[in-house]
Image: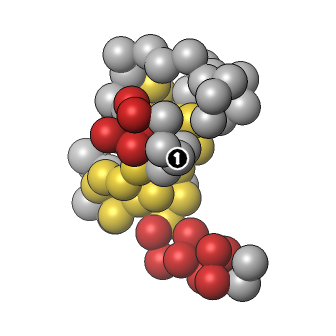
Amino acid sequence: MNEIVLLNAYPFTCPACRHEQMARPSLFMQTGMMNSGAGSCLECGIFLHLEIAPGNDRMIAKDWDEYLVEVQDV
């Protein structure tokens, strides 16, 4: 997380409906604790896990339930 330069907001694409939208960094991201946030798609309402992409220019959005399965397998 120490290599991320925070922007005011980041674009991301909903993985369910492909709607393009913007999100602000989470408190975890702002404090440097972890690259993790959450929110709902403004178009379809699916709950999402958000993280800043390695290039620092957008966020990666994943379905929350799929994200939980990924982190439980680690």
Q: Is residue 22 above or below residue 50?
A: above
Q: Is residue 73 above or below residue 14?
A: below
- At x 68% / y 24%, what residue is drawn? 3
Residue under circle 1?
A: 34
- At x 36% / y 16%, what residue is drawn? 8
* Left or right of residue 9: residue 4: right
Which coloring applies here?
secondary structure
Please say whether residue 14 is visible from this viewpoint. no
Instruction: Quadrant for the C terminus, please.
Output: bottom right
Label 1: few (<14), some or many (≥20) within 10 Å? some
Secondary structure category for the residue under label 1: loop
Disc 1 residue type (three-letter): Met
Whole-percent x and y of residue 51?
54, 44
Residue toward you, 41 or 28:
28
Instruction: Quadrant for the N terminus, please.
Output: top right
The mark total stands at 1
Please say whether residue 43 is visible from this viewpoint. yes
Q: Quadrant of residue 59?
A: top right
- At x 32% / y 40%, what residue is drawn? 27
Whole-percent x and y of residue 35?
54, 44
Residue toward you, 13 or 17:
13
* Left or right of residue 38: residue 13: right
- At x 41% / y 59%, what residue is drawn? 48
